Image (cartoon, rainbow, N blue to C red):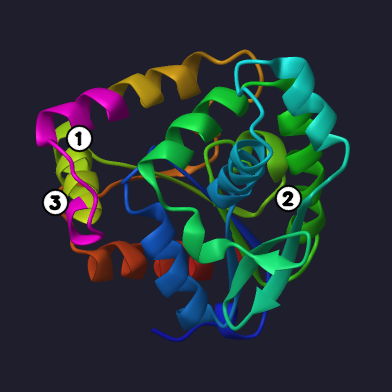
Amino acid sequence: MRGRYLDKKIAIAIDGPSASGKTTAAKLLAKRLGYRYLDTGLLYRALAWKVMKEKIDPLKEDEVSRLCRLKPVRLEESDHRYRIRIEGVDVTEELKTPELSKVSSLISKYKAVRESLIQLQREVGKEAGVILVGRDIGTQILPDAPVKFFMDASIEVRGKRRYEELVNRGFKSELAETIREMSQRDQQDRDRAISPMQAAPDSVYLDTSGDSLEVVVEKMLAEVNRQIS
């Protein structure tokens, strides 16, 4: 497909729960459009990485908040994506562990955590030709983005995807436990007082339960072209 999206660069917001396919879709969409993408969930995982390195109890909000004021997380552009650095060290490839997922889920509800990382995300969102992926991009980070998507899939499909991902990366996992933990995380994300996960009113809802990734990306490209033509 060709269209005006090849010439006009905009900001695109993609939200959705874990394993909905949003990050992989954003990666492919960015390549098709010549954009950069940022998986904002990695920012929270990076802060969790620092919390664990400093041996801070993630349940102690005041100590985590004190760490946030130091602004340890930095971004670096690389090809079609942003990589994550902490104190000059690239930690991007170290952030996809079950333990970091649990810690990031705990600290992401803290006001200081969200405020510090929201500012960083909005700075990225000011640039042309960028895709931000997360859970509150369309509602809190880039509410004025001309194109917004909310990606979802059934809990069974998402649980199986995450289970297979963990197993392929060498982590021990049980499908039933993975689904249970994912359902719990969904509830925490929807119920948190600050920036809960929800679809923006003007977002395009995409259920990825049955569609291939290629079909999903084509739908996204068609929407981008429709919005800016």
The residue at 14%/44% (across/down) is 160
Residue 200, placed above or below residue 36: above
Say what amino acid the circle numbered 3 marks: Gly
Viewport quadrant of the N terminus: bottom left
The residue at 72%/71% (across/down) is 76
- The earlier-in-sequence mark between 3 and 1 is 1
Q: What range is drawn magenta here?
A: 167-182
Residue 123 image offset from top left, x and y in percent: 82, 55
Give yes or no for residue 178 being in the magenta stretch. Answer: yes
Viewport quadrant of the C terminus: bottom right
- The earlier-in-sequence mark between 3 and 2 is 2
Give the number of the mark in front: 2 or 1: 2
Q: In the image, 51: left or right of 135?
A: right
Give the number of the mark in front: 3 or 2: 2
Kindly give the residue lying farthest to the right in the view shown. Answer: 69
Local secondary structure at mark 2: helix
Give yes or no for residue 10 being in the magenta stretch. Answer: no
Q: Which residue is mark 1?
A: 154
- The earlier-in-sequence mark between 2 and 1 is 2
Residue 30 image offset from top left, x and y in percent: 51, 74
Residue 127 image offset from top left, x and y in percent: 78, 67
Query: Mark 3 Cα within 10 Å, few/some/many (few <14, many 20+)?
Result: few
Residue 79 seen in this snapshot: yes
Circle on res. 129: none
Q: In the image, 60: left or right of 69?
A: left
Q: Which residue is mark 2?
A: 121
- What secondary structure characterizes most of the magenta part? helix
Q: Which residue is mark 3?
A: 210
Q: Are marks 3 and 1 in contact (CB under 8 Å)?
A: no
Say what amino acid the circle numbered 2 marks: Gln
Local secondary structure at mark 1: loop
Residue 198 seen in this snapshot: no
